[in-house]
Image (cartoon, rainbow, N blue to C red):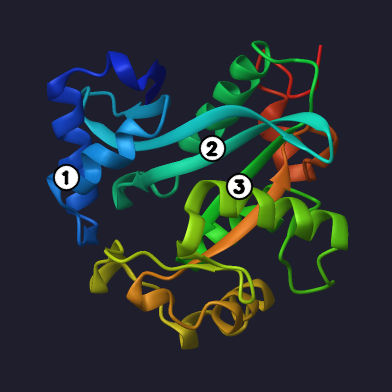
Amino acid sequence: MRSRLLPTSSLTQTVREAMRRLLRSHFDGITQQGFDEDLANKNWAVLIENDGGALVGFSTMAFIRTRHAEHPINVVYSGDTIVDPSAWGSTSLFRSWIDAIRQLRTQSPDAPTYWLLIVSGTRTYRLLPLFWTQFYPRCDRRTPHRNQLLLDQLAIERYGADYHQATGIVRFARPQVLKAPLRETAPARRHNRNARYFYDRNPGHSRGDELACLTELSDSNLTRAGRRIAATLRTSLEPR
């Protein structure tokens, strides 16, 4: 497989249509207008293609600069993200995403970078404990006050009234819902404490409710599994 990091402004109509088709094959509630609007609010896209050149995964993101507690910070807001089941066993998207963040960090190296992602399924949520040592919310400790303040600020800035601060849930008027055959059922993952926690925190996940999550994107915050993957890349998450 190969990956590409492209400005969303440079995506051709052919690539955009392939992205929308891939998303529609996995989610209900995808409309042309909704897809176009989400893409217009993102400035970068990571594309994953198989050896035949077919698109098998992508992730869009907004990489922006803002301020928190009077200090500058970089923020990554995740957009539409999907990997075809044929590529579920591959780490290509994560590797490519980390490499993309490292490249973008060089544009703004003097401030920490945080990732705000909203999650409607356990497959995505379980990536956090797999690759990051500190992330919130999590099952084994309360979110520290300073982290909660940052999470709330970023979620409100991005999602406005769709973010429900009391629950940490983002609820859209027109949600994207994973198609039934691709959903993980709660009983199938009840043995996993992170999955149990996710289901408890986001009981409306099957209707498209999203749990807002936050982690700092730094090499020092990677788990052993994350460091193994990062070691194969040529760039660093740390400020230069």
**Residue 167 placement (x, y as % from top left):** 61, 76
Q: Which residue is mark 2?
A: 94
**Residue 90 placement (x, y as % from top left):** 46, 41
Along the horizontal axis of the image, is 95 left or right of 37? right
Above or below, 40 against 135 in this view is above
Q: Which residue is mark 3?
A: 116
Above or below, 211 against 92 in this view is below
37 or 207: which is nearer to us? 37
Image quadrant assignment for residue 56: top left
**Residue 30 placement (x, y as % from top left):** 19, 54
Q: Residues within 10 Å of mark 2 (few under 14, many from 20)?
A: some
Q: Residue at x 69, y 28 (%)?
A: 230
Image quadrant assignment for residue 22: top left
Instruction: Report the amino acid beneath label 2.
Output: Phe
Report how far apart the C-alphas of labels 2 and 1 lie in the structure. Answer: 28 Å
Query: Which numbered tag is attached to residue 10?
Result: none
For marks 2 and 1, the one nearer the N-term is: 1
Q: Residue at x 43, y 71 (%)?
A: 209
Q: Residues within 10 Å of mark 1 (few under 14, many from 20)?
A: few
Above or below, 75 against 142 in this view is above
Report how far apart the C-alphas of labels 3 and 1 lie in the structure. Answer: 24 Å
